[in-house]
Each structure stands twice: as structure tokens, then as C-alpha cells.
Amino acid sequence: MHKRLVGRGRSADVYATDDGAWVLRSYRDGGDTAREVALMVRLAEAGYPVPAVRGAAGPDLVLERLRGPSLTEGLLAGAYEPEAAGALLAGLLDRLHALPGRVVHLDLHPGNVVLAEDRGPVVIDWRTAEEGAEPGLDRAMSALILAEVAVSPAPYAPGARAGLAALLAASPGPLLLAEARARRAADPNLTAAEVGALGAAEELVRSLAG
């Protein structure tokens, strides 16, 4: 199988396959994707929007190629308003938490939602997902990630703040912020500057959550 690099995330590379209908997602640090695949298959059977899985071996996953921009791309292009994006994330979190098994994604942010042309929003990147965890941790992780952008000097920081406020308003349950901050700080993919901004991000979430 020939492959062509079409995307590069913090922990994985994504390649297009020959037929164009599938992509190969390969984790650079190795590992086994069996648990991730099993969870995605179960979620798909329960009707949750995840990519179809064709196969997996070691650190590699062969997944359905989704046609459409990420939610981040939609926001930057002006095709999606921040408030609508925050509400969408809240809805996806609530749908996930309503399923049996207490599944949490723990990295649900606009970059991990694809606005698929044929079926609407699809949630990707399930490597950090866990079962049996508290929904409040999942909500806190999503809120904290948005807040990190909101307290940054990026030109789209105000939009991130608006999206964060909408997320918190649409999904007003408990937030396990201390645990979420500790997990973010331990993420080897974050830069020292990003870790240093976590305190301000947590303060912003607490202020907006009331």
C-alpha cells in the first residue's frame, strides 16, 4: 500500500491510502491501538459519530477518510460561529456521557471534530479516551483546552473565549478542573509556555462557570 502524508498532529501522522477512501493514522511513539479500536467500534454501534475502522496493527489505524473541514478550520474560515461551536462541543460531550460505560474522550476540542460533508460532525482521535471516568473531567478538559487559547495572544483568542462561555452554558454540570489541569500539565506534547498558561486558563474557566 502506497501512502501520502496528508496531516500531522502532535502525536500521530496521517496518510492517504491508494483508493482515497481510507487514511492510515500512525502514532509516532508506537503503542497498541487495540483498545482504541474496540472502543470506537462500540461507539459506532451505539450510534455515536466516529470514523469507521477498517483495521489496526500496533500503532497504526486504518480509518474512514472524512471529507470536510475540522471545526477549527470552519471557525477560522468564518463558516462557523464560536458560540455555535461551543454548543456543538457541549452536545457531543453530553451525547457521549449518556452512553453506557461512562466513556470520556478527554481531548474533545474543535480540532478533533470533523464537519463531514455526508453526515455532519464526527469526533476523531480517541487515544486518550477512558471508561468509568467522571463526565465532569471530560467537560473540564474541553473547557481548559478552549481556555488555553482564550488566554493566549492569538488573534482568535476572543472567539475561543466566546466558544468556552457557550460550552459552559450548554453543559453546566460539575467540572473537575484540578484533575484536568494536572493531566494537561503532564501531557508531553505541551510546550513549557502552554503548561505555564494553565493557571490563567483554569482561572478563566472558573470565572465563566460561576
Image: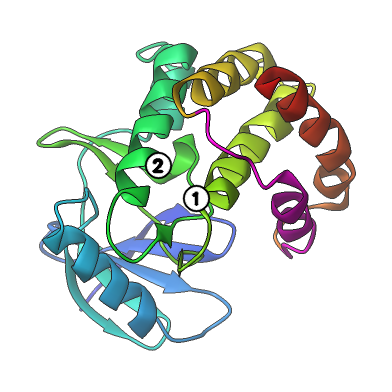
Q: Decide: few, some or many residues near mark 1? Use Cα within 10 Å; few <14, some 14-19, many ≥20.
A: many
Task: Tell me the quarter of the image containing the N terminus.
Answer: bottom left
**What percent of the width, then of the height, locates residue 49?**
22, 48
Number of marks present in the image shown = 2
Element marked by disc 1: helix
Q: Which residues are magenta?
A: 172-188
Please state which amino acid type lies under the numbered disc 1.
Answer: Pro
Q: Is residue 122 above or below residue 169?
A: below
Residue shown at 37% from the left, 39% from the top: 94
Task: Out of 190 and 83, give the one closest to the viewer.
Answer: 83
Question: What label sits on residue 135 in the rendered view?
Answer: 1
Horizontally, residue 28 falls left or right of residue 125, namely: right
**What percent of the width, then of the height, locates residue 159?**
59, 14
Horizontally, residue 40 falls left or right of residue 45, namely: right
Residue shown at 78% from the left, 57% from the top: 182
Task: Out of 86 and 188, give the one closest to the viewer.
Answer: 86
Q: Is residue 198 magenta?
A: no
Residue shown at 12% from the left, 37% from the top: 119
Residue on which disc 2 sits: 93
Residue shown at 10% from the left, 62% from the top: 19
